[in-house]
Image: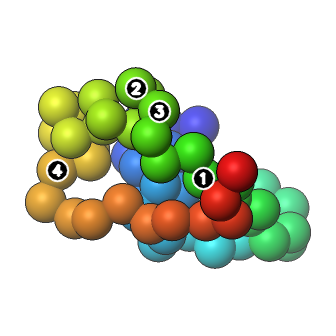
Amino acid sequence: MTIKQFAQLFRGEAKNWKDLGGANTPVRFVDRVSTDTRTAFPNYPAFQGKPLATGRRQ
């Protein structure tokens, strides 16, 4: 998976693994909004300019 594809997952642009070259299976996104990882995303160009999607809250 490329950084661009990883960012597409977190922005909600890829809803199915086939969108990223994988099997025809829905992406199941579990969201932990308050993590340091998510806080750091805006520091990277792949995540800038578009809001991050949210998934099932954990």
Q: Earlier in the sequence, mark 4 or mark 2?
A: 2
> Where residue 36 is drawn, which disc sits there?
2
Indicate the secondary structure of the residue bearing disc 3.
Answer: loop
- Spatial CA span between label 1 and label 2: 12 Å
How far apart in space, not on screen, are marks 4 and 3 (Cα)?
A: 18 Å
Q: Residue at coordinates 65% horizontally, 59% vertically from top-left?
A: 57
Q: Residues within 10 Å of mark 1 (few under 14, many from 20)?
A: some
Cα–Cα span, label 3 and label 2: 4 Å
Q: Tell me which corner region of the image, top left, top right, bottom left or bottom right, holds residue 28.
A: bottom right
Q: Residues within 10 Å of mark 2 (few under 14, many from 20)?
A: few
Q: Are marks 3 and 2 in contact (CB under 8 Å)?
A: yes
Type of amino acid under label 3: Thr
- For marks 4 and 1 on the same chain, the one whose residue lies earlier in the sequence: 1
Image location of residue 21, percent across then percent down: 68, 57
Identified at 21% across, 41% down, the residue is 42
- From the viewer's perspective, is the residue at label 4 or at label 3 nearer? 3
Element marked by disc 4? loop
Left or right position of 19 against 24: left
Which residue is under mark 3? 35
Q: Which mark is residue 39?
A: none
Tell me the distance, in whole angstroms, between the alpha carbons under discs 4 and 1: 19 Å
Could you tell me the amino acid type at mark 1?
Asp
> Which residue is pictured at 21% across the width and 33% down the height?
44
> Quadrant where the N terminus lies?
top right
For marks 4 and 3 on the same chain, the one whose residue lies earlier in the sequence:
3
Q: Which residue is mark 4?
A: 48
Q: In the visual, does 20 lie left or right of 26?
A: left
User: Looking at the image, is mark 1 or mark 2 earlier in the sequence?
Assistant: 1
